[in-house]
Image (spheres, coloured by chain):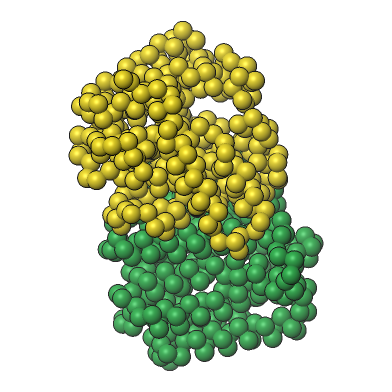
Chain colours: A yellow, B green
Amino acid sequence: MSPTAADIFAPLPAIESFLDTWLTSLPDDRPLALREAMRYSAIGAGKRLRPILAWHACTAAAGTGPDTGKASLLAGAAIELVHCFSLIHDDLPALDNDDLRRGKPTLHKHTSEAMAILAGDQLLTDAFLLLTTHPHPISANTRLELLRELSHATSAMISGQIYDTLGGTPDNLSPLDRVQLVHNNKTGALIRAACRMGALCAPSPSPQTLEAITTYARAIGLMFQVVDDLIDVTQTAETAGKRTNKDAQAGKLTYPSVLGIEGTRQEVTRLHAAAINALTPLHTNAEALRAIADFLATRTK
Amino acid sequence: MSPTAADIFAPLPAIESFLDTWLTSLPDDRPLALREAMRYSAIGAGKRLRPILAWHACTAAAGTGPDTGKASLLAGAAIELVHCFSLIHDDLPALDNDDLRRGKPTLHKHTSEAMAILAGDQLLTDAFLLLTTHPHPISANTRLELLRELSHATSAMISGQIYDTLGGTPDNLSPLDRVQLVHNNKTGALIRAACRMGALCAPSPSPQTLEAITTYARAIGLMFQVVDDLIDVTQTAETAGKRTNKDAQAGKLTYPSVLGIEGTRQEVTRLHAAAINALTPLHTNAEALRAIADFLATRTK
């Protein structure tokens, strides 16, 4: 039987608990207001898509029982901290100037711009602190591999953010190449890292397995943002839980603005197929990853 | 013969060249404007105090020739990137709102707030990317030790920034303890990390050596900011190369506001003596570190 949405999200309690325990264990010489700001942004909100992907990519690479993914908790939590940091800075008045995130006020509205800048900085730093210091059963070399993946992916994400907010994509690119460059960096990089880092947490994943998971991750990473573009133009803020139609208002390049809504839907179909095809060598180990591709292709928020 | 200021700063060309080479070697798929913003903030400006400290702490711990410090170039460059990031975010309108830094417009005045936020984020990320990926001859375990030091120190620095900008130091602290807490975190942490990380780059530093260098670093780290407070109230902007008297204007807690100018000068003398005393076990290996303590106690900008 194919995995259901409930199966996909079965690791959620373990992921939430790992993140919560880590944030609670942080030294209490940090300012109280900082600790509160970090919890406000990082706990009890969001789909945890990236840790979920890390978990199932780990299972796909390890090829054993349902709890194999546990080895990836450290990687998933680190990526989630980077993701939280990126949302906080992205929402700032100088960038996207958003008041609403995950159905509640953005951090700078809830606290202050200064706190949002600094709490974001701390969440980014904590991702590296976590990977470096957490007593998770993982070798020094794997830690360094994870740190390498995460620092490359975070860099790509920041570049994507700059292209998206400030422009500057190379002049010789077509509009489609341009929006693909933005999306691959801004959203795709962390999703790719989530899958690759999860797989790296499996015991000795083969190059073929890593390659299959990377190809899958590249397809769903881009697809995720293409679907986001669709949601932005087709859903109400109430359904999506955040302000919609904002990209068009901000004059940003999106898939619907380049390919139209129907062309964008076809692109989703193409990327979904590419993701599923990539997983063929992994047989039944990759069932959850396939179910996630289905889920992400059809989500409405 | 005791080292002169020229001896202290002799490693500067090696440090500048290491940083410059690294920034030039970064992948050119980053936005051009980002690469320019990073160079604007990170190249050809600043005293490079932290890499200089890392270099001489490495020499003090290794106890051999004048080029021993080269092993610390990686550590020093990583700390300098974090330092640059912290200055950029600190200068933002939502924080200290400074227009002038190192005698030229701050990055958000030179580019935009959005770029300053994101270039700061990238410099922070690059510190970890550098420590993780640079082909410097250094073991995986030492890399992880350096990453641990740097992520702890960066966290302390951010907490110091929050205490300094937004308040929130614990209620039961005296004004002196309060300003010491801010300074130890905001400025002291990276200076401590510079010395410790430099020493960790020496081959197998003994626990006694590390302890001596840490005690020294704690004293000069605090002293550095106490002297900064003195400069802020006693020097003109022209001499200091940045806006002065700004702490009093911002109502910030400083050493002169708590101890008076004479009391603050005595505190500098006390911290200088503590730094020098700590180095006794290192004999002549620590001559450059002693000279740096002298230099930092008497600087006027």
Residue B220, horizontal then vertical, whole percent: 56, 77
Residue A95, horizontal then vertical, whole percent: 61, 36
Residue B129, horizontal then vertical, whole percent: 39, 51
Residue at coordinates 65% horizontally, 20% vertically from top-left?
A: A238
Answer with left or right where residue B288 lies relative to residue A69: right
- Quadrant assignment for the N terminus of chain B: bottom left
Of B260 and A24, nearer the camera is A24
Answer with left or right where residue B214 lies relative to residue B188: left
Answer with left or right where residue A258 lies relative to residue A218: right
What is the number of callouts on the image?
0
- Quadrant assignment for the C terminus of chain B: bottom right
Is residue A228 positioned above or below A85 on the image? above
* Residue A235 in sight in this render: yes
Of B142 and B137, nearer the camera is B142
Residue at coordinates 40% horizontally, 29% vertically from top-left?
A: A8
Residue at coordinates 32% horizontally, 53% vertically from top-left?
A: A138
Residue lying farthest to the top in this orientation: A262
Residue at coordinates 40% horizontally, 83% vertically from top-left?
A: B208
Residue A234, horizontal then vertical, whole percent: 57, 13
* Residue A229 in sight in this render: no
